[in-house]
Amino acid sequence: SVTAPIKALSKKPVAAGGGGNTVLVPSSAGIKYAYVKHTGKQTDGSTSTTNNLIINFGGTAGLSLGPEEFAWFPAQASTEITGISSSSHTILVEFAYFKEQ
């Protein structure tokens, strides 16, 4: 079973490269499970982008997702998961997370 914190399936824009990282999963107590998907769209939800989505774990780049790619992974409790675009486009990201009980 799962417990709080829980974030149901949501969408959020992440900044273009050179901007600040966008928090997708905050650090918290307990192991978290996260789902992150690059929608292939810019923030407006209709304009396509070919920029990769860079997923950072505690400030260190860990994953690079291309358009329409997704990842499902566990993360340590103290790890904040953030995202940023690899170049000049903002990216609309789909994500969710929950904590293991």
Image: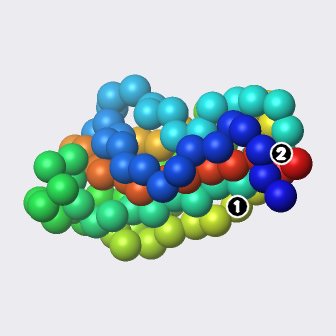
Q: Which mark is residue 31?
A: 2
Residue plotted at (78% across, 52% down): 2
Q: Is residue 53 visible?
A: no
**Which residue is disc 1 drawn over?**
73
Residue 21 place in picture, x, y as percent: 45, 32
Height in image: 66 above or below 11?
A: below
Position of residue 23 relative to residue 96, above or below, is: above
The residue located at (72%, 38%) in the rendering is 4
Relative image position of residue 26 (x, y in whole percent) = 63, 32
Question: What type is the residue that disc 1 sits on?
Answer: Phe
Residue in the picture at 57% in, 44% down: 7
Neighbor class of circle 1 (other Cα within 10 Å; few <14, some 14-19, many 20+) is: few
Q: Label 2, label 1: how many angstroms apart (C-alpha)? A: 11 Å
Image check: 34 left or right of 39? right
The 10 Å Cα crowd at callout 2, few under 14, some 14 to 19, many 20 or more, is some
The colour scheme of the drawn protein is rainbow
Comparing 7 with 83, the one in front is 7
Q: Secondary structure at mark 1?
A: strand
